[in-house]
Image (spheres, grey):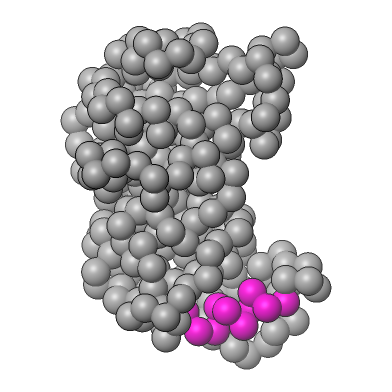
Amino acid sequence: MLVLLPPSEGKAPSGRGVPLKPESLSLPGLAGARQAVLDELVELCAADEEKAREVLGLSEGLRGEVAKNTELRTAGARPAGEIYTGVLYDALDLASLDTAGKRRAARSLLVFSGLWGAVRVTDRIPSYRCSMGVKLPGLGALGSHWRAPMAAVLPEAAGSGLVLDLRSSAYAAAWRPKGEVAGRTASVRVLHAPTRKVVSHFNKATKGRIVRSLLESGAAPAGPAELVEALRDLGYAVEAAPGGAGRVWMLDVLVDEVH
């Protein structure tokens, strides 16, 4: 099983560890595209703080994020699972998983990123600010920048098993499963059951809980149909729309309480 996650806007501090080693990151086929984004982002933030803040869509109160980006090559690096914070990652709570759960997380979780493309939770990265929605002056829109490299690398990363897609729309645009891979991919929405509406906070929190439940249980669904059964066994209310040949399954997880 491969689980595709969005990153978080907020991130933990880099800390004092060994700096980034780009060659150590997973999915080495993304190395060239990563280097291109890293080079332009660092140069932009070092050369013109105001322009960088505008390009990155940062408010005055987030001015310090520009300075953080200038130090990406020298700042301490930590496992991505420790860098990403926020509602989904608080609910997932990787640090409190048992040893078996942490091993499953290392194998199965892939976090999408405007800067790195995608990383495993064990990949060591510095704290940064660069969403997939950014349009860099030189490279252009990052969603478009990542499409070709992702198309070349992600089918192999997906292997032959289930792909569970929990990404937000901006990150989903960087890679859309096609063909045979799409047929074994399940995309999940979390809906407030009485209204059938998506609400951002509990959508993210429930997705974090879903991943944690799967990791804790050791469930290994072979495909979308088996995932539906596994989630129901874990206590989730799930409605499924099968994808058919070459089409992604759409799963709605229904939640009564907004929390």
Residue 111 percent location from the top left of the image: 41, 50
Q: Please determine whether, in this image, residue 7 is positioned above or below residue 68.
A: above
Residue 142 percent location from the top left of the image: 53, 59
Q: Residue furthest bottom?
A: 47
Q: Residue furthest right?
A: 60
Queried whether the magenta region covers residue 26, the answer comes back as: no
Queried whether the magenta region covers residue 70, the answer comes back as: yes
Residue 244 percent location from the top left of the image: 36, 12
Residue 7 percent location from the top left of the image: 51, 51
| Total count of labels | 0
Q: Quadrant of the N terminus?
A: top left
Apparent side of residue 164 relative to residue 6 in the rendered image (left or right):
left
The residue under the point 67% across, 36% down is 201
Q: Nearer the viewer, residue 177 or 197?
A: 197
The residue under the point 59% across, 44% down is 87
Q: Please determine whether, in this image, residue 8 is positioned above or below residue 235.
A: below
Say if residue 235 shows up in the picture. Answer: yes
Q: Nearer the viewer, residue 162 or 234?
A: 234
Q: Please determine whether, in this image, residue 212 is positioned above or below residue 235.
A: below
The magenta-colored residue range is 63-72
Apparent side of residue 95 relative to residue 256 in the rendered image (left or right):
left
Q: Please determine whether, in this image, residue 212 is positioned above or below residue 248.
A: below
Q: Quadrant of residue 29?
A: bottom left
Q: Specify the principal SS of the magenta part.
A: helix
The residue under the point 30% across, 25% down is 217
Q: Nearer the viewer, residue 152 or 251?
A: 251
The residue under the point 32% across, 53% down is 120
Say if residue 141 shows up in the picture. Answer: no
Q: Quadrant of the C terminus?
A: top right
